[in-house]
Amino acid sequence: MDEKKKGVQNLNINFDSTPIVYTDNINITANEDGVVFDVMQRLMSTNNVRVVARFGMSREHAKKLITILEATIKSAESAMQSAEKKVKLN
């Protein structure tokens, strides 16, 4: 099976213009047309937040995001548990 059939994509990131933005808050709204994510940061020790990124997608795409996010987190947790076991054995 070739890469296109497997859904594999080449990822190209310009690290100078695409920083990782930390979030400690997210607001998600949805309607019949799609889902919008407002990604936010809390401002110091206040109850104020600022939006640092916004993105939207179809509801179908959001459902795929949920599935991939769950699988990614489970994989990371499994890898951490394996690493912890190796440390305890040494």
Image (tube, rainbow, N blue to C red):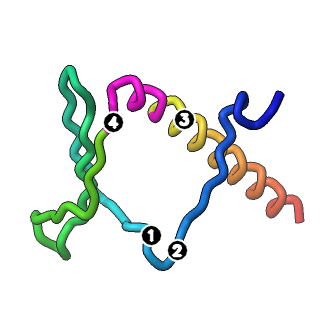
Q: Would you place residue 23 above or below residue 28 in this image?
A: below
- Label 4 sits on what residue type? Met
First in sequence, mark 4 or 1: give its number: 1
Q: Residue at x 43, y 74 (%)?
A: 17
Residue 5 vs 12, above or below: the answer is: above
What residue is disc 4 on? 57
Q: CA distance from mark 3 to mark 1?
A: 22 Å
- Amino acid type at circle 2 is Phe
Q: Secondary structure at mark 4?
A: strand
Residue designated by label 1:
18
- The residue at which mark 2 appears reads as 15
How crowded is the residue under tag 3: few (<14 C-alpha within 10 Å), some, or many (20+)?
Answer: few
Disc 3/disc 2 C-alpha distance (Å): 23 Å
| Residue 58, horizontal then vertical, whole percent | 33, 29
Q: How many residues crowd around disc 2 within 10 Å: few (fewer than 14), some, or many (20 or more)? A: few
Q: Is residue 36 left or right of residue 81?
A: left
x and y, in percent, of residue 65 in the image: 46, 35
**Quarter the N terminus occupies:** top right
The answer to whether 14 is drawn above or below residue 75 in the figure is below
